[in-house]
Every structure is written in C-alpha cells, then in structure tokens.
Image (cartoon, rainbow, N blue to C red):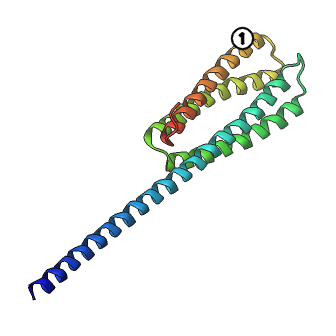
C-alpha cells in the first residue's frame, strides 16, 4: 500500500506541476498577445498621424507655391488654404489617437510637432493676409521665416518618428 500511495501522491504532484505550467504558459501567451495587440494599435496610430502630417504638409506647400508669384491668384490661394485647413483638421484627429494610444514620450513629441506646425501656420496665415492686402513689402522676410519654421517642423517630425519607433521597439 505504501507503493500505491507513493504513486498516487507522485501522480498528483505531477498533475499539479503540469497544470501550473500550463497556466503559466497560458498567462504568458495572453500577455504576449496583448503586447502585440497594443503595439499594433500604436503603430497604426503613429502611421496614421505621420500620413496625415504628410498630406497636410503637401497642401501647405501648395499654398506657399500659390503665394510665390508677384501678384498671386487669390481665388487659387483661397482654395489651397481651404484644402490645407481641411487636412490640418485630419492631423488634429490623428493626434488625438496618438494621445490615447501613445506613451508620454510619444505624446510629448506629437505636442512638439503641433507647436512647430502652429508656428509655421501663423507665418503662412500672415503671408496670405499680406497677399490679400496686396502688400509685398515683407515678402522676402516672410519667405525666409517660413523656410526656418519649415525646418523646425521637419526636425520635430523627425524626432516624433524616432520616438515612436523607439516606443514600438525599433530603436534608431
């Protein structure tokens, strides 16, 4: 009977160890699945944001191009400004998702992009107002300031991209 009891206890311990191992494996698999799910949502949010930024920046470039002639076609400028504003709203919507999904470092980088975007947009608005008023006196200074603000925005987007990649586990 001692041998039977020992066998029974051994079987029970073995079963408990197997059950514990299965539970641990299941928990680890669930955790890994959640991490992958979270990463995918963040990646989608960051990619959507970068895509919206790209589209909006192309529209802003079109506004600047329309302002380039000595006597810009104001209806054309207004149409391009309207498209820019529409795409800027898309950027704001995409940024909200980044704020919901991203860790603090990514959110801070997106906020830096928003600040740089607003600084450039203010210069472009000023340029449009001057064009509507027929004032060409500050054209060279405005163009130079816009180029400087574009560079600042480029750097902010570059930092966002690097920070987002790091948050996704892709350093550099």
- In the image: residue 49, left or right of residue 87: left
- x and y, in percent, of residue 61 in the image: 77, 28
Residue at screen point 41% across, 59% down: 31
Most foreground residue, 105 or 153: 105
Q: Residue at x 64, y 39 (%)?
A: 50
Relative height, residue 34 to residue 129 (above, below) = below
Across and down, in percent, residue 121 comes to: 67, 29
Question: Residue drawn 9% across and 84% down?
Answer: 2
Compare residues 90 and 15 and report the one nearer the observer: 15
Task: Tell me if I can see residue 125 in this picture.
Answer: yes
- On the rendered structure, is 133 left or right of 141? right
Q: Is residue 136 above or below residue 117?
A: above
Q: Nearer the viewer, residue 51 or 89?
A: 51
Residue 91, picture quadrant? top right
Q: Nearer the viewer, residue 124 or 110?
A: 110
Which part of the image, by quadrant, shows the N terminus?
A: bottom left
Q: Which residue is mark 1?
A: 141
68 versus 95 height, above or below: above
| Spot occupied by residue 89 in the image (x, y as percentages of width and height) | 67, 44
Q: Residues within 10 Å of mark 1 (few under 14, many from 20)?
A: few
Q: Quadrant of residue 24?
A: bottom left
User: Given the current orientation, which residue lies at the most extreme left position?
Assistant: 2
Give the number of marks: 1
60 displayed left or right of 16: right
Q: Does residue 92 appear in this view?
A: no
Q: Quadrant of residue 57?
A: top right
Name the element at disc 1.
Answer: helix
Give left or right: position of 12 versus 50: left
Q: Residue at x 56, y 30 (%)?
A: 115
Vertical order, 111 against 90 (above or below): above
Q: x, y (%) of residue 160?
A: 55, 33
């Amino acid at each position: 009977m001692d041998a039977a009891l020992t066998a029974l206890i051994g079987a029970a311990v073995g079963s408990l160890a197997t059950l514990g191992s299965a539970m641990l494996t299941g928990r680890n698999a669930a955790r890994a699945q959640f991490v992958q799910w979270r990463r995918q949502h963040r990646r989608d949010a960051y990619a959507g944001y970068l895509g919206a930024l790209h589209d909006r920046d192309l529209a802003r470039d079109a506004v600047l191009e329309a302002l380039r002639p000595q006597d810009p076609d104001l209806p054309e400028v207004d149409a391009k400004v309207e498209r820019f504003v529409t795409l800027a709203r898309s950027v704001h919507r995409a940024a909200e998702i980044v704020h919901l999904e991203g860790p603090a470092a990514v959110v801070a980088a997106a906020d830096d992009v928003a600040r740089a975007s607003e600084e450039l947009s203010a210069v472009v608005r000023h340029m449009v107002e001057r064009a509507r008023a027929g004032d060409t006196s500050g054209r060279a200074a405005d163009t130079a300031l816009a180029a400087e603000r574009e560079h600042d925005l480029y750097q902010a987007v570059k930092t966002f991209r690097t920070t987002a990649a790091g948050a996704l586990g892709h350093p550099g």
